[in-house]
C-alpha cells in the first residue's frame, strides 16, 4: 500500500514539482536576457581535463570525494569574455541539473557557446541543447 503511494509520488508528482521549480526560477530572473547554450558534463580526470584534474583554470582546488557538490562549471572561451571566474550563474532547462553554479574553469578553445558541469567520476555523463544561462545579479 505505502509502496504504491510512494511510487505514485515519484512517477507523477515529482516531475511536475521539478517543472514548477524551473518555472519559478525563470520568473525570479525575468527581465535578464539569457544566453542559449549547450551543456555537457565532465569529471575531474586527466582524460577529460589536463594533467592537474583537481585544480581548475582559476586555481580552485576541487574536492575529489564529491566534486558535484561544489557546483562548478567550465565555460567556453567565447562565454568567458562575458562570464568571469567566480561569477555565479543560473542554468535552466537541464532537468535535475538545473540550478546555480560558480564559474571556476574554462574549456578547450575548440568549444563554442558551451558550458561543462563538473560531476563525479561515477556519475552519468550527459548533454543538453538549448539550455538557458543567466548571470546571477546580487
Image: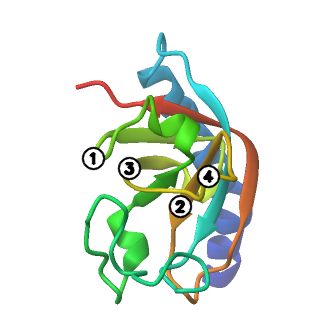
Which residue is label 1 attached to?
Answer: 86
Q: In front: mark 2 or mark 1?
A: 1
First in residue order: circle 1 vs circle 3: 1
Which residue is label 3 attached to?
Answer: 103
**Residue in the picture at 53% in, 27% down:** 26
Which residue is label 4 attached to?
Answer: 109
Q: Quadrant of the N terminus?
A: bottom right
Q: Separation of disc 4 and disc 1 at Cα?
A: 20 Å
For the rendered model, the colour scheme is rainbow
On the image, which quarter does residue 14 sit in? bottom right
Report the residue that reaches farthest toward the left: 138
Q: Separation of disc 1 and disc 3 at Cα?
A: 5 Å
Q: Nearer the viewer, residue 62 or 47?
A: 47
**Residue in the picture at 66% in, 51% down:** 39
The reply to whether dot 1 and dot 3 touch (C-beta < 8 Å) is yes
Crowd around label 1: few <14 · some 14–19 · many ≥20 (10 Å): some
**In this view, 61 is above or below 45:** above
As helix, strand or loop, the secondary structure at mark 1 comes to loop
Residue 119: x and y in percent read 51, 73
First in residue order: circle 3 vs circle 4: 3
Q: Separation of disc 4 and disc 2 at Cα?
A: 17 Å
The reply to whether dot 4 and dot 2 touch (C-beta < 8 Å) is no
First in residue order: circle 4 vs circle 2: 4
Which residue is label 2 attached to?
Answer: 117
Q: Would you say 13 lies left or right of 133 here?
A: right
Q: Separation of disc 2 and disc 3 at Cα?
A: 10 Å
First in residue order: circle 2 vs circle 3: 3
**Residue in the picture at 42% in, 23% down:** 28
Q: In front: mark 3 or mark 4?
A: 4
**Residue in the picture at 56% in, 24% down:** 34
As helix, strand or loop, the secondary structure at mark 4 comes to loop
On the image, which quarter does residue 93 sit in? top right
Amino acid at each position: 500500500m505505502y509502496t504504491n503511494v510512494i511510487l505514485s509520488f515519484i512517477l507523477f508528482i515529482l516531475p511536475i514539482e521539478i517543472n514548477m521549480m524551473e518555472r519559478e526560477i525563470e520568473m525570479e530572473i525575468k527581465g535578464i536576457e539569457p544566453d542559449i547554450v549547450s551543456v555537457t558534463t565532465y569529471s575531474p580526470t586527466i582524460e577529460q581535463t589536463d594533467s592537474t584534474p583537481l585544480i581548475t583554470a582559476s586555481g580552485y582546488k576541487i574536492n575529489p570525494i564529491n566534486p558535484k557538490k561544489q557546483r562548478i562549471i567550465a565555460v567556453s572561451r567565447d562565454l568567458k569574455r562575458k562570464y568571469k571566474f567566480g561569477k555565479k550563474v543560473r542554468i535552466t532547462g537541464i532537468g535535475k541539473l538545473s540550478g546555480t553554479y560558480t564559474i571556476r574553469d574554462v574549456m578547450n578553445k575548440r568549444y563554442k557557446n558551451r558550458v561543462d558541469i563538473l560531476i563525479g567520476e561515477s556519475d552519468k555523463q550527459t548533454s543538453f541543447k538549448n539550455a538557458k544561462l543567466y548571470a546571477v545579479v546580487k
